[in-house]
Image (cartoon, grey):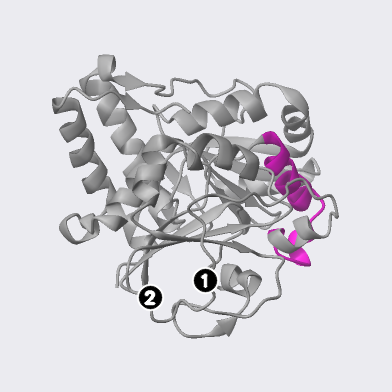
Amino acid sequence: MRHYWFSLIYISILLATVSACAEEKSTTIGAGNYSIPGWFKDSFLEIQSDSEEAYAESKHLMLFMHLDGCPYCSRMLDENFRKGKTKIFIQNNFQVIAINILGDREIAWDKDTSYIEKTLARELKVHFTPTLVFMNKDGRRVLQLNGYRSPETLMHALNYVNDQQYYKMKLAEYISKQNKPVYSLKSHPMFIEMRDFSDYKKPLAIVFEDKDCADCDEFHQKVLQHKDVLKELSKFKVVRLDTYSDQVIIDTDGNKTTAARWASRLKLDYRPGTVLFDRGSEVTRADGRLYHFHFKEILRYVSSAQYFEYATYNQYLNARQKQLRNAGVAIDYGQ
């Protein structure tokens, strides 16, 4: 069974980005060049002490886990940490430490455990950059957001942590209680009706959405409608599930469930979240905001069974980008 933990998406998407930029800048569009804001905390990287210091100021500690050249890091910093309501809210309620997921600085995680930056990233199962890790006063992780978040989506998480709602409920439940629908489910020519997934063994894409999905409009407009994505989607059965629906479905393991319960069992908090299956098993997923190039390559990795040849998505994507560059094809990391 190929499970998404095995694919290590953070390396697959972002190491490949850095590699592409280094080799042929002329064929790379939209690579991310950025700097860490000067107001981030200059830390000795003793996380438990940092958490206690933040709590003494009535704040939470946030780890901003990033990778040089990451276009998603650049966008999230620009939209959430350099301007707007989120920047002000973060500065007032959080202390932020930058962690490079390929770095070699030593981090004292607690009194008994130390890691270097890249080892910590593996330990925390960082699948996208940027990843935000929120700590409570005891230095315990209370929330982890894998991948880019828009200001509106991030603000939900910031309020959730700041109000210490993590003691009471999961983030998805907290968002559902806000009673402020922001999205009406959209149709798509590739979406089909399907309720029993137990015997389907061909490539299958399950898109989880709901009325609280602040990023779904952009996902439909800039990703799902892109011609390259449509070409790859045609190789899948594509099913959209509404996590607010109480309709009974049969999941890939043969369990009677609902979309909400299935998403919870998959530990899928982000909407839109796309989980990709082949031969009845999950291969990988996209549970953070991706641009069309990376989304269509995730689809191709599954539909063409590249995961049999390449043990990790990183290996596949590096090989794929070399192939595209050698053929003179521009690689677009933009929208």
Q: Nearer the viewer, residue 264 or 254?
A: 254
Residue 232 badge: none
Res. 42 in view: no
Give the residue number, with chain letter if any, for mark 2: 200
The amino acid on which the numbered mark 2 sits, given as a three-letter code, is Tyr
What range is drawn magenta here? 151-171
Q: Main secondary structure of the magenta part?
A: helix
Tag 1 residue: 194
- Above-or-below relation of 324 to 239: above
Question: Is 162 colored magenta in this rendering?
Answer: yes
Look at the picture and state if 261 lies above or below 317. Answer: below
Residue that appears at 75% across and 66% down? 169
| Left or right: residue 183 compared with residue 252 | right
Q: Horizontal placement of 216 versus 27: left or right?
A: right
Q: In the image, what residue occupies the spot 57% across and 42% down?
A: 220
The residue positioned 47% from the left and 56% from the top of the image is 124
Image location of residue 272, percent across then percent down: 58, 51
Q: Which quadrant would residue 69 be assigned to in this image?
A: top left
Cα separation between marks 1 and 2: 10 Å
- Point out residue 39 in the picture as x, y percentages from the top left corner: 64, 23
Element under disc 1: loop
* Secondary element at tag 2: loop
Instruction: Answer whether labels 1 and 2 touch (C-beta < 8 Å).
Output: yes
Q: Amino acid at mark 1?
A: Met
The image quadrant of residue 29 is: top left
> Please, which residue is most extreme toward the bottom here?
255
